[in-house]
Image: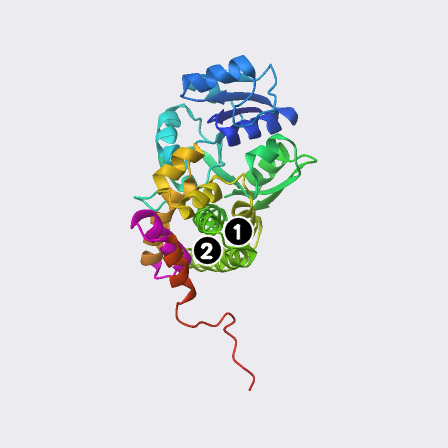
Amino acid sequence: MAKIGILGAGSWGIALAALLHNNGHEITVWSKIESEIQMLQEKHEHKMLPGVKLSEDMIFTTEDRICVEGMDLLVMAVASKYTRETAKRFSKLVAPGQIVVNVSKGIEEHTLMTLSEIIEQEIPQADVAVLSGPSHAEEVGRGIPTTIVVGSHSRKTAEYLQSIFMNEVFRVYTSPDMLGMELGAALKNVVALAAGIADGLGYGDNSKAALITRGIAEISRLGVAMGGKYETFNGLTGIGDLIVTCASMHSRNRRAGILIGQGKTYQEAMDEVQMVVEGVYSAKAAMELAKKYQIQLPIIEQVNAVLFEGKNAALAVKDLMLRDKKIEISEEWQD
């Protein structure tokens, strides 16, 4: 049995708390939002995960030390835009070598850093790892079979975390490619916005398939240029995560995209979804990375134009369709 602190009491943090408790671990959940902790203490259920009952012996707290000191590992489950402030807040409490597993997805806009890089910068003494893959909280909380990947700098840490998280409904693979995992996780949210916009415009399965397929091509091009492994983008944290995020109504990015396709601004869409829409925050960062590495990202470029430049969504799709003629496979013709 391990003692585990969950930093963040949103739906994903709580789903993982339930899973880890079912695995026999001792769980403490922290949030700086007093009303959120009070809800969990009183109801032992999160409003975003109805029907997922939490054990009476779980600890819910707003006290920083209670959730960190003496823990075998920490799970960083705050939204990406709060990762740096949370890491900075807990930095002095984290012991040398204490494992911190980032389970959020995103890229910091002004630094272009991945979330694990932020945590390593703010908590240099921590052993930082990543958990990512096609995994909606609503399904993990209900025990629906899910497959995911844990990434780490060391095989020892990865295999330890694999044993901590894995059970009969939660299969965990390991990978050394933390960068590729996090890039796939962050950039797929931008493509999922595009998929939602297409849904909001009334387009069909052909459009969705095109966005998913060409979307992973864009993500792979950029990710490999940055040092990620091509295999990663063909795996669970690449194409797998992209498929589930583009296809599911559990996806806040797809739901927000639908509203944008129907004519709402990104802020109106986020207000209606009532959750942090990570793709909005990663979209600008993706374009900055594209410029830095001189990579073409036509889908992500059009998403940025719709989000931040007021471009009509239908016109953005038309511009994508009318781009210069391209080839898909670069091998030479035989004739």
The N terminus, quarter of image:
top right
Q: Nearer the viewer, residue 86 or 119?
A: 86
**The stretch drawn in magenta includes residue 56:** no
Q: Is residue 247 visible?
A: yes
Q: Would residue 210 appear left or right of 274 to someone viewing this image? A: right
Q: Is residue 70 above or below residue 128?
A: above
Position of 172 with respect to 67 (left or right) is: right
Task: Name the residue rendered at 49%, 49% in the picture.
Answer: 199
Q: Circle 1 is placed at which residue position?
A: 238
Q: Secondary structure at mark 2?
A: helix
The stretch in magenta equals 293-312
Label 2: how many residues lie within 10 Å, few (<14), some (14-19) or many (20+)?
many
What whole-number distance in Å separates the C-alpha atoms at marks 1 and 2? 8 Å
| Residue 301: image location, x then y, percent | 36, 56
Residue type (three-letter) at the residue carrying disc 1: Gly
Q: Nearer the viewer, residue 33 or 229?
A: 33
- Seen as rendered, the residue at the extreme bottom is 335
| Position of residue 187 measured from the top left corner of the image (x, y, whole percent) | 44, 49
Q: Residue furthest top?
A: 42
Q: Which mark is residue 221?
A: none
Quadrant containing the C terminus in the rendered view: bottom right
Instruction: Give residue 219's mark.
Output: 2
Q: Main secondary structure of the magenta part?
A: helix
* Quarter holding residue 136: top right
Q: Is residue 310 magenta?
A: yes
Q: Quadrant of residue 65?
A: top left
- Please state which amino acid type lies under the numbered disc 2: Ile
For residue 303, above or below residue 296: above
Look at the numbered disc 1 and give the secondary structure of its residue. Answer: helix
The residue drawn where x is 52% and y is 32% is 12
Q: Which residue is more in the foreground, 287 or 154?
A: 287
